Amino acid sequence: MRILVACEESQAVTIELRKLGHQAFSCDILPESGGYPEWHIQGDVLNQFNKGWDMMIAFPPCTHLAVSGAAWFEEKRKDGRQQEGIDFFMKFVYAPIERIVIENPIGIMNELYRKPDQIIQPWQYGDEFQKSTCLWLKNVNKLQPTKRVGKGEFFEWIDKKTGKKKKQPLWFKEARSLSSEERSNIRSKTFPGIAKAMAEQFTLPLKQLKLF
């Protein structure tokens, strides 16, 4: 299959698809960091939609959409950044490609667009981490867990405003010490187990038709 992996510079999913013999290409405005520049299209992914792809697996930026950044939503609504993120996300929804997967963390698109077809976790696919990941699917099967493991370490604290106990995955908290760009890159990386499962399962024949 000819598969476009949109907004992916890490090439995590692209590499797994290539292992299975698919003609997969990552595409991002950034250069690839996966080590296979010959499998990467650097540029605006919107220019690639009409080039005969059989499938697209898309990872649109979530910076202005994810609930983890809700504290900045008001500012982003006022200056237009959030609307830009919404509009960009919807470009993938209506892309003229037969089979589509869109990935994003829990965020405002769950309400503004529709609820995702499923929410998965890295610990369902062999990686001991907690990260709720939403998937919107068109003409592909739901992703099935491959190896359930522990959920990883968590950081707990008492919220000063509410007095309530809160917790957060330790890996997510530790990313706060990095620069904004580094933090965003780490938090948006696709975990190896999920990348492998996506490559193996989304390319299987359709069992149950799912339409937008």
Image: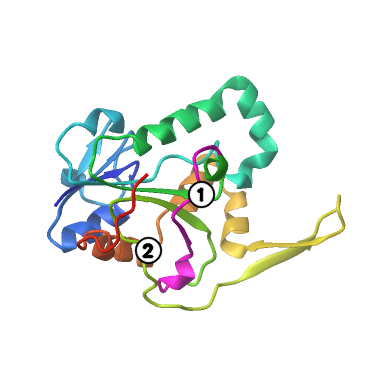
Residue 125 forms part of the magenta stretch: yes
Local SS, label 1: loop
Across and down, in percent, residue 185 comes to 46, 47
> Measuring 22% from the left and 32% from the top, which residue is drawn there?
48
Q: In the displayed image of the protein, which residue is found farthest to the top?
A: 79
Amino acid on which the number 1 mark rests in the picture? Lys
Quadrant housing residue 151? bottom right
Q: What residue span does the magenta drawing correspond to? A: 112-126
Across and down, in percent, residue 86 comes to 49, 32
Q: Which mark is residue 194?
A: 2
Q: Nearer the viewer, mark 1 or mark 2?
A: 1
Q: CA distance from mark 1 to mark 2?
A: 20 Å
> Measuring 40% from the left and 56% from the top, which residue is drawn there?
190
> Measuring 21% from the left and 63% from the top, which residue is drawn there?
204
Q: In this picture, is 97 found above or below 17?
A: above
Amino acid on which the number 2 mark rests in the picture? Ile
Residue 51 forms part of the magenta stretch: no
Local SS, label 2: helix
Q: Which mark is residue 115?
A: 1
> Measuring 37% from the left and 44% from the top, which residue is drawn there?
212
Could you tell whether 80 is left or right of 197 in the image?
Answer: right
Q: Check disc 2: other Cα within 10 Å, few if <14, some if 14-19, many if 20+.
A: many
Across and down, in percent, residue 101 comes to 34, 49
For the question of whether residue 194 can be seen, the reply is yes
In the image shown, does 69 or 92 lie closer to the viewer? Answer: 92
In the image shown, does 160 or 182 lie closer to the viewer? Answer: 160
Q: In this picture, is 188 found above or below 95?
A: below
